[in-house]
Amino acid sequence: MEKHLTRRGFIRNAAIGSAALAGMSGPRAPSVFAAEADKPALLGGKPVHRGGWPRWPQWNESWEADVVKVLRSGRWCRAGESGKDVQAFEAAWAKLLGAKRCLATASGTTSLIIALHVVGVDAGDEVIVSPFTFIATYSAVLNRKALPVFADTDPASLTMDPATIESRITERTRAILPVHIYGLPCDMDPINAIARKHKLGVVEDACQAWLGEYKGRKCGVLGDLGGFSFQNSKHIPAGEGGAVTGDSDELIDKCYSFHHCGSAFGTNKGKGYFTCGDNYRMMHYQAAILLQQFDKLVKDTARRRANADHLTSGLKQIPGIEPARLPENSRAVYHLYPFRYDAEQFNGLTRDKFMRALSAEGIPCSGGYREQYYDGVLDEATASRGYKRLFSAKRLKAYRDSFQELKGNQLVCQTTIGMTQSMLLAERSDMDQIIEAVRKIRTHSAALAKA
Ligand SMILES: Cc1ncc(COP(=O)(O)O)c(C=O)c1O
């Protein structure tokens, strides 16, 4: 857990990457690095970067008063519309996104569960899902006792390949669940067109895509409903938290009822707890923290984008490094800065060793998601009594066999590397050093591969 910071500490924390680099970004810097460029840090040379990247989460003591106000009000729960922070957050988040409505929720996972329920996903249905994602996308579908059926991943964009959706649609398919993974917007026009043609709901997993844009509109308002996460690592964090966004009063009113134990709300009329529901409510504390961060999110997003664009322009010149391609007229927000790595262009240096070499140069990085459909959770679900009642043995076998067809996703899982979002809040000179470090590793890739 991050230690509490004073205002000065906050600024120091946020700027730690640049401060540490102040002496390195002047005219002397290139000669220092040129001298060290000969030997990779993994083989005993001097790292390109001195470390000290911006840390996450970041907060300010000026936020404390509003959190304490919630505490002293005694109104911590939004049930019965007591308190005002959650409602204020919903109005502000909807406005920022250009959505008609927003419902705050306990988490991103619960936002997806609610949205899937409200677009009509029921036990025994199927949902077309992006496989390259955090496990919560799969588990939200399993929570509805539906089958997450995977479209393939486009290796160029790292998102759902729309060309692979239609062949997966069956008479049970009820919805499509594209994921704007790492804040890279999916190509939503063809996805929405397929959904319209087959009368399917579209729930966007925008849990990593706060302020992502596709053709002038924000992620999370491109389908029927969108789900967001405000968990600790996210660009606008509250420890835990989520939201459902959309333009339909009817759908969001249903979301409200479902998230508040099935009580009547707005156009969703009834008596008492008249419809199916659960407790997926956000607390006022969470909203009070989120409300502090709107300006910060906007500013941070602009900075991440500018630095990511700079990285892309440098890294794409290096053979064997392929930054993610965005759909036309879209803007990513980079929860991770991802690229695909081709070991052949690096003298056979494995991805694992490349990542170790880059980390040794002072550039922390990690692989992307695994082929999680082999991890066990889907086998556990489909072997369960419930799923055996809901789906035929033939369907479940064909489902399991279909994982082998996910060649694009397999490639993406094997070759993606990412750097975390807070690194993109550092200086332009830090981005130059990332590019320099990758170049250095490529120059010495034969030696590194042998070592
Ligand atoms: C793509 C994606 N979907 C869903 C979730 C679930 O969000 P939460 O952790 O807030 O439940 C996350 C969170 O990490 C996510 O990254």
Image (spheres, rainbow, N blue to C red):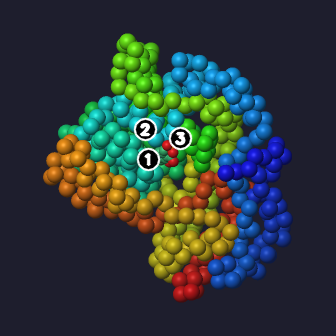
Left or right side of 99 for 51: right
- Residue at point 75%, 58% (across, down): 17
Is the CB of the residue bearing disc 2 within 8 angstroms of ligand 1? Answer: yes
Residue 240 vs residue 228, the one in the foreground: 240
Please report contact status of discs 1 and 2: CB closer than 8 Å, yes or no: yes
- Residue at point 69%, 64% (across, down): 432
Residue 31 position, x and y percent, is: 79, 75
- Label 2 amino acid? Leu
Disc on res. 229: 3
Is the CB of the residue bearing disc 3 within 8 angstroms of ligand 1? Answer: yes
Q: Earlier in the sequence, mark 1 or mark 2?
A: 2
- Label 1 amino acid? Ala
Left or right side of 47 for 192: left
- The 10 Å Cα crowd at callout 1, few under 14, some 14 to 19, many 20 or more, is some
The residue indicated by pointer 2 is 112
Disc on res. 136: 1
- Label 3 amino acid? Ser
In terms of secondary structure, where does tag 1 sit?
Answer: helix
